[in-house]
Image (cartoon, rainbow, N blue to C red):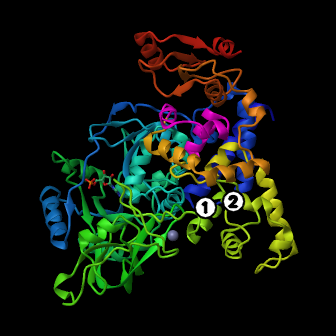
């Protein structure tokens, strides 16, 4: 097999595995094997840019940055849907239909997925464009971001029409949403409120590699195009599945309005078992010919209607308000409720967010409260059943002292949250910081888990992450559930963390608001922890994407004596507190102040390498040409629209060789 055939075969294999994993939820190889194959392909593609394919599975990781999403007109308008809320509404709708249609009418019932609508265009089986709904007439081209969503096929399986559009909803399943929030809470960020807004916000992120990290899914429900040879909505769904799209299996054919009502009644309660949020059912006239006869109103199709589920609500008693202390010292009040069934699960707790929320609701222990599960995962208390309130109840007084260490709480101006300022002596803060330090995306210390950290702290063996490097095996063995072997592993894991690169160490330090991406930016810009520690707020905000809030947090962290000491100790133990010499050797400022747009296929380096070269030499990469672009680096097959735009704006177009000369 020659290289090209090898590349093509790997792409096909990876596509099939992606399909099994993300569309069918039925993987047939291990993640490890998948990664191995992906790495092999990445390697081959980097060495052979002549076989570039914009739809290769390797491009799922993203990397392209879009500053401004281009507005494009929809070929077929993306209509809204009329809503219905009752059996009567639906029966009225059917009456209107039967006035226009003489033959029998059957319906396709589908769930109404709660996310962001999306229109995908495929040409010759390849994803060509992904556009948001926008105002229905025109939307934003978010193709680079959508390509990173693994359940969106980049290359279809057989039997598809040469050109068509398919519509669906980008959703963020609950499990992934919760995982994302856990990570945000870990760095002291406010958690996202609900999956829907997070999904639609994700599509507009400028950095597609950030989108790639979000566990988004695309669920499809409608095909548009000419001469598609599809006669009914239901048949369309089946075909879309055959071509490789993720079409939820819950869709059902109903032969009468009674069957539609049955479907609705069933999913009204069962929808809570689904992995993603739904807010209703969409009923569609099944026959496409009939759909055409019915046509559209100014705003919506006459042949479809949404039935909206009522957000479920129950009332229960508030037994107690407790307060949790996070790693950053943030206090979260929690409502402890008399257990009650809501939306298919037993609810015992609800978040109260902060003191303002408690005051706004005037919620008191002993109150009967209304609890709702809407788009949010954690149930919400919406109101107090005031007539039921006990006469002698008194308003809730927010705690003034930390429930864990009894230090007086503080609340900074403009912030909603109270904080425990005793970061050194407050157990959940001490433990939380070390747990963050060892976590997978930070120092990834094997052989040491969150519970062991708590054990080590509670036994006074460590009180900060620098202490980890002074632990001995003898100290660890006597602990619960520790043995010779596990103690060895723990010590070896800590030792190995000394090789973790600076950018991850910086993330591990747990500076508030410094997540993975910010840590990377700061590491790259400052190169050493000392340089970063000496930076002022004014300097920090000149770094790309660093705002006041982050800058102030960084300065506050490094101005604390105790943090300086800990960092000094980490340094002495050999933890990486600067970019390695090897990495540094490849970095210059030769391109500082210049913004590049990369277009086409390159021969000597891959596109990603080219972008990395630009960034390593101090330049910036942008996804689209604008007045701020300094150079367009053009490879083979550069897009004609890019060329026109560059010419119009007078932006110089340079070749790969000319670029390489610039940095040589
Ligand atoms: P609305 O935004 O309330 O007018 O409802 C219309 C939107 O529902 C459409 O733009 C779609 O994004 C969304 N939707 C979710 N699930 C479906 C489905 N199964 N069929 C059609 N539209 C759906
Ligand atoms: Zn405390």
- Left/right of residue 359 with respect to residue 431 in the rendered view: left
Residue 111 versus residue 344: which sits nearer the camera?
344
Judged by its main secondary structure, the magenta piece is: helix
Answer whether labels 2 and 1 touch (C-beta < 8 Å). Answer: yes
Of callouts 2 and 1, the N-terminal one: 1
Q: Where's the C terminus, which quadrant? A: top right
Q: Secondary structure at mark 2?
A: helix
Q: Which mark is residue 307?
A: none
Above or below: residue 400 compared with residue 315: above
Label 2 neighbour load within 10 Å: few <14, some 14-19, many 20+: many
Give the residue pinned by disc 2.
465
- Left/right of residue 249 with respect to residue 98 in the rendered view: right
Q: Is residue 526 magenta?
A: yes
- Range of the magenta residues? 516-544
| Figure quadrant of residue 444 | bottom right
How far from the left and from the top, in percent, is residue 67? 44, 31
Residue 375 versus residue 362: which sits nearer the camera?
362
Residue pictured at 68% horizontal, 71% vertical: 457
Above or below: residue 573 compared with residue 272: above
Give the residue pinned by disc 1.
433
How far from the left and from the top, in percent, is residue 480? 76, 81
């Amino acid at each position: 097999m020659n290289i090209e055939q090898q590349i093509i075969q790997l792409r096909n294999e990876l596509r099939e595995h992606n399909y099994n994993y993300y569309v069918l939820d039925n993987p047939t190889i291990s993640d490890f094997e998948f990664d191995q194959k992906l790495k092999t392909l990445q390697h081959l593609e980097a060495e052979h840019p002549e076989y570039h394919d914009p739809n290769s599975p390797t491009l799922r990781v993203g990397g392209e940055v879009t500053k401004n999403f281009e507005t494009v007109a929809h070929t077929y308008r993306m209509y809204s849907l009329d809503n219905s809320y009752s059996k009567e509404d639906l029966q009225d709708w059917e009456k209107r239909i039967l006035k226009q249609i003489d033959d029998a009418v059957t319906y396709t019932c589908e769930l109404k997925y709660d996310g962001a609508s999306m229109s995908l265009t495929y040409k010759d089986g390849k994803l060509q464009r992904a556009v948001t709904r926008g105002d229905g007439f025109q939307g934003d081209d978010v193709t680079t971001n959508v390509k990173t969503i693994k359940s969106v096929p980049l290359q279809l399986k057989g039997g598809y029409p040469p050109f068509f559009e398919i519509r669906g909803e980008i959703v963020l399943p609950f499990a992934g949403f919760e995982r994302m929030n856990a990570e945000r809470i870990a760095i002291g960020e406010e958690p996202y409120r609900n999956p829907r807004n997070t999904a639609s916000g994700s599509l507009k992120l400028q950095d597609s590699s950030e989108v790639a990290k979000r566990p988004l899914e695309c669920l499809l429900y409608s095909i548009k195009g000419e001469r598609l040879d599809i006669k009914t909505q239901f048949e369309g769904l089946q075909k879309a599945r055959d071509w490789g799209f993720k079409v939820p299996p819950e869709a059902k054919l109903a032969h009468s309005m009674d069957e539609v009502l049955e479907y609705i009644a069933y999913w009204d309660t069962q929808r809570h078992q689904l992995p993603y949020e739904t807010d209703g059912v969409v009923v569609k006239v099944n026959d496409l010919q009939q759909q055409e006869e019915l046509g559209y109103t100014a705003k919506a199709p006459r042949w479809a209607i949404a039935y909206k589920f009522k957000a479920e609500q129950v009332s229960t008693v508030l037994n107690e308000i407790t307060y949790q202390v996070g790693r950053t010292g943030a206090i979260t009040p929690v409502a402890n409720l008399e257990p009650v069934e809501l939306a298919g699960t037993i609810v015992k707790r609800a978040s109260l967010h902060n003191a303002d929320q408690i005051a706004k609701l005037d919620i008191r222990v002993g109150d009967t409260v209304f609890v709702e599960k809407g788009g949010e995962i954690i149930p919400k208390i919406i109101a107090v059943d005031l007539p039921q309130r006990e006469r002698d109840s008194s308003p809730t007084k927010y705690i003034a002292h930390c429930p864990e260490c009894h230090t007086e709480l503080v609340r900074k101006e403009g912030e909603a949250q109270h904080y425990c300022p005793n970061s050194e002596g407050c157990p959940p803060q001490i433990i939380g910081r070390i747990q963050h330090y060892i976590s997978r995306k930070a120092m990834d210390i094997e052989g040491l888990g969150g519970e062991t950290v708590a054990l080590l702290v509670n036994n006074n063996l460590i009180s900060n992450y620098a202490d980890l490097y002074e632990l001995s095996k003898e100290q660890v063995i006597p602990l619960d559930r520790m043995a010779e072997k596990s103690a060895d592993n723990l010590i070896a894991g800590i030792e190995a963390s000394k090789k973790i690169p600076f950018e991850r160490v910086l993330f591990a330090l747990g500076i508030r608001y410094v997540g993975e991406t910010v840590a990377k930016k700061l590491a790259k810009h400052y190169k050493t922890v000392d340089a970063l520690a000496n930076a002022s707020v004014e300097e920090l905000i000149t770094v790309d994407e660093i705002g006041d809030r982050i800058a102030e947090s960084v300065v506050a962290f490094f101005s604390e004596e105790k943090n300086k000491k800990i960092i000094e100790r980490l340094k002495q133990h050999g933890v990486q507190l600067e970019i390695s010499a090897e990495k540094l050797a490849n970095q210059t400022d030769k391109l500082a102040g210049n913004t590049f747009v990369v277009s086409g296929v390159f021969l000597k380096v891959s596109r990603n390498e080219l972008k990395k070269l630009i960034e390593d030499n101090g330049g910036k990469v942008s996804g689209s040409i604008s007045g701020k672009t300094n150079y367009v680096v053009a490879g083979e097959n550069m897009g004609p629209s890019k060329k026109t735009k560059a010419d119009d704006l007078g932006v110089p177009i340079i070749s790969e060789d000319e670029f390489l000369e610039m940095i040589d």
